[in-house]
């Protein structure tokens, strides 16, 4: 769990849509005395209840290929970060070519049944207005994971909320 990796001088807010995951996180925060974690809240990543320009950084670890509407999630992250803030993510994105890409295409149907997409293209989230790649690199065996830091490049109009 990544919560313990944040420096103790930070103020960390965690969100998840799943009550069971939040319960596990609360237990770990308590057992490990993670004082940097200020709150854990149930929330849909497509509709944060945080105000515009609220956070310095938003971190999303391994979520883009499992959420139903990743473009909307990234747009929502962009909304809640301050001007010049960053969206930092680690995720698996489709390789596009070669041996790994062939395996991703073969396993896509099965991984979709498990709730994640092995053939998820990063282009789906890189077109969100107001965000630009500040840094990116692949890592792990065969480069199957990608670290991306996206920087807010301009003011983003507030996202209309549905009722």
Image (cartoon, rainbow, N blue to C red):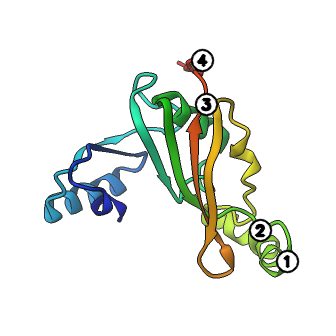
Q: Mark 1 points at which residue?
A: 98
Between disc 4 and disc 1, whose residue precedes? 1
Identify the residue shown where x is 66% and y is 72%.
Answer: 144
Q: Mark 3: which secondary structure?
A: loop
Between disc 3 and disc 1, whose residue precedes? 1
Residue 69 visible, this angle: no
Identify the residue shown where x is 52% and y is 36%.
Answer: 77
Label 3 to label 1: alpha-carbon separation:
33 Å
Residue 33, image x and y in percent?
Answer: 13, 59
Contact (Cβ within 8 Å) of mark 3 with mark 2? no
Residue 126 relative to residue 155: left or right: right
Contact (Cβ within 8 Å) of mark 2 with mark 4? no
Contact (Cβ within 8 Å) of mark 3 with mark 1? no
- For residue 153, the mark is 3
Give the number of the mark in front: 3 or 4: 3
Between disc 3 and disc 2, whose residue precedes? 2
Q: Mark 4 points at which residue?
A: 157
Between disc 2 and disc 4, whose residue precedes? 2
Residue 56, image x and y in percent?
Answer: 40, 36
Contact (Cβ within 8 Å) of mark 1 with mark 2? yes
Image height check: is 64 above or below 54? below
Identify the residue shown where x is 21% and y is 58%.
Answer: 29
Q: Name the residue under label 2.
A: 95
Residue 131, image x and y in percent?
Answer: 63, 36
Q: Mark 1: which secondary structure?
A: helix
Residue 120, image x and y in percent?
Answer: 72, 58
Contact (Cβ within 8 Å) of mark 4 with mark 1? no
Image height check: is 37 above or below 151? below
Image height check: is 53 above or below 38? above
């Amino acid at each position: 769990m990544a919560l313990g990796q944040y420096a103790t001088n930070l103020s960390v807010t965690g969100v998840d849509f799943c009550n069971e995951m939040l319960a596990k996180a609360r237990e770990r925060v308590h057992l490990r005395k993670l004082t940097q974690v200020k709150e854990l809240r149930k929330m849909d990543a497509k509709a944060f209840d945080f105000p515009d320009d609220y956070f310095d950084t938003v971190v999303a670890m391994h979520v883009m290929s499992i959420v139903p509407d990743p473009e909307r999630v990234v747009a929502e992250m962009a909304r809640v970060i301050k001007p010049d803030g960053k969206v930092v993510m680690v995720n698996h994105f489709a390789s596009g070519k070669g041996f790994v890409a062939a395996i991703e295409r073969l396993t896509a149907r099965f991984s979709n049944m498990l709730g994640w997409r092995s053939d998820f293209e990063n282009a789906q989230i890189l077109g969100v207005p107001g965000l630009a790649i500040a840094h990116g690199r692949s890592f792990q065996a065969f480069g199957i994971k990608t670290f991306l830091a996206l920087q807010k490049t301009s003011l983003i109009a507030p996202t209309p909320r549905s009722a």
